[in-house]
Every structure is written in structure tokens, then in C-alpha cells.
């Protein structure tokens, strides 16, 4: 998202007839991970919170309980870098597409929506729980790798690879790539998918060792898709 100067943002907000501000001046804001599509949080924003979001690219909201503006991450450090702001068809709700820098929820969970009603005994459910999206699973593995890198937990395979360095990790990436080719040529889908999973895992470890992120790869893929 292109950040705006304060005067530009104020002008933008005041000239958006598409927005239907309610009597209390607060619009619900759905916060969605821009990469995985996971819903992270629902909050509220007034015109000033939206203006500040457009100015600095960080997610600003309005706290109904504290009756004041607040920026996500100002105390926890878990910010939202806003990629895009959208408005719904009726003009009375906003969507922030974000890249989170940490857990969304104050409990430490990645998303505020981590409980099912059946979990807290309110209603039974006849259907199995929804699984995480494919990209979300990839990023969950990535965040685990980052945690291992930060703590260097003894006995961790990830920590072993990171300690050994790029040469060791590169060797594993090469070995897993070869295993993918062999499995594919043998025509065994389950084995092929297993070997590709190993390859992706070691590639993520390589990214961590290089101080890079999956988002950089996603950006390359987006450019190629265009």
C-alpha cells in the first residue's frame, strides 16, 4: 500500500462518499492476512484511525472500552503492516489486508478466532473442524522455524541445520530435490508429495539461514503470475 501524507489522507477520507459512517462514527474492521487469507481479528475504526492507517501503513483502530485510538502492536510489538484497505459493497465495513509481525490475539494465538463454540460447550458440531489453508500451514511451519532460530533449542533438527550453516542446508536441499525426482519418476504420488514436503521444509530453513522470508518468494511468484 502506498502511504499518504497527512493532508492527502485527510482529503481522501473526507471525499469518500462510498463510506457510510454510522451515528457513533465507528466502522467494523475485519483484519485478514494478506498472504494466507486467514481472518485474524475484528476491531473498529473511526475516520481518524482510518486516516492514520493510510498515512503510516500500520493498522490503527478505535477502542470502544478505552474510548481512544490505538495502534496494533504499540505495547505488544505485534504490528500489522497494512498492504491494502478495502470497503464492502454497502460502505459500512472495512477490510485491512495485512502482513502481521506476530500473533494477532492478546492470548498469543495467531488469530483471535481460535475457539469453536463446541469447544466451550455451547453447541455441538456435526462437522469436522476446518483445516488451515495451504499457505497458512506453510507459514505455521515457517514461524516454528523462526522460533527455533530465536531460541536455538537443544536437540532441535532445525537448530542443528542452522548451526551447521548454508553448506549443510544446501546439501539437504539438493538431496531432497533428487528424492523428489526419483519419486516422481517411480510414479508414486504419496511418496512424491512426501518428498516435496521435505524439500519445502528444508527450503524454508534455507530462507531462515539467509535472513530472508517466504514473502520475498511470494512476491517473485506474484510478479511471474502477472
Image: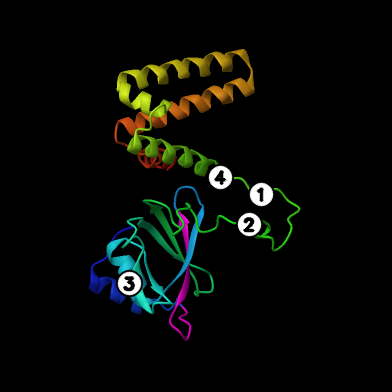
Q: Quadrant of residue 169?
A: top left
Q: Give yes or no for residue 105 being in the magenta stretch.
A: no
Residue occupied by mark 3: 51
Query: x, y (%) of residue 31?
Result: 46, 61
- Front residue (pair 171, 148): 148
Closer to viewer: mark 3 or mark 1 = 1
- Closer to the chain start, of discs 3 and 2, is 3
Residue occupied by mark 4: 133
Q: At x 47% / y 79%, what residue is drawn?
A: 20
Closer to viewer: mark 1 or mark 4 = 1
- Closer to the chain start, of discs 2 and 1, is 2
The answer to whether residue 211 is left or right of residue 44 is left
Per the model, the C-alpha gap separating discs 4 and 3 is 32 Å
Q: Which residues are magenta?
A: 20-33
Per the model, the C-alpha gap separating discs 3 and 1 is 38 Å
Say which element carries label 4: loop
Residue 31 versus residue 217 in the image, above or below: below
The answer to whether residue 162 is left or right of residue 141 is left
The N terminus lies in which quarter of the figure?
Answer: bottom left
Residues marked 2 and 1 touching at CB (< 8 Å):
yes
Residue occupied by mark 1: 129
Residues marked 3 and 1 touching at CB (< 8 Å):
no
Residue 48 versus residue 191 in the image, above or below: below
The label on residue 178 is none
Amino acid at each position: 500500500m502506498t502511504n499518504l501524507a497527512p493532508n492527502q489522507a485527510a482529503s481522501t477520507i473526507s471525499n469518500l462518499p462510498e463510506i457510510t459512517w454510522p451515528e457513533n462514527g465507528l466502522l467494523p474492521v475485519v483484519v485478514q492476512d494478506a498472504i494466507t487469507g486467514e481472518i485474524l481479528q475484528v476491531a473498529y475504526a473511526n475516520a481518524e484511525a482510518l486516516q492514520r492507517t493510510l498515512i503510516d501503513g500500520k493498522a490503527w483502530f478505535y477502542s470502544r472500552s478505552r474510548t481512544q485510538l490505538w495502534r496494533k502492536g504499540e505495547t505488544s510489538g505485534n504490528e500489522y503492516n497494512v498492504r491494502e484497505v478495502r470497503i464492502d459493497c454497502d460502505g459500512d465495513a472495512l477490510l485491512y489486508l495485512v502482513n502481521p509481525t506476530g500473533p494477532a490475539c492478546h492470548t498469543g494465538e495467531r488469530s483471535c478466532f481460535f475457539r469453536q463454540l463446541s469447544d466451550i460447550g455451547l453447541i455441538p458440531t456435526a462437522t469436522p473442524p476446518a483445516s488451515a489453508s495451504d499457505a497458512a500451514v506453510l507459514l505455521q511451519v515457517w514461524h516454528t522455524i523462526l522460533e527455533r532460530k530465536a531460541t536455538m533449542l537443544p536437540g532441535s533438527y532445525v537448530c542443528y541445520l542452522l548451526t551447521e550453516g548454508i553448506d549443510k542446508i544446501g546439501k539437504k536441499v539438493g538431496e531432497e530435490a533428487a528424492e523428489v525426482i526419483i519419486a516422481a519418476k517411480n510414479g508414486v504420488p504419496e511418496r512424491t508429495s512426501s518428498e516435496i514436503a521435505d524439500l519445502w521444509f528444508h527450503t524454508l530453513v534455507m530462507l531462515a539461514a539467509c535472513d530472508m522470508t517466504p514473502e520475498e518468494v511470494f512476491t517473485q511468484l506474484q510478479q511471474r503470475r502477472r
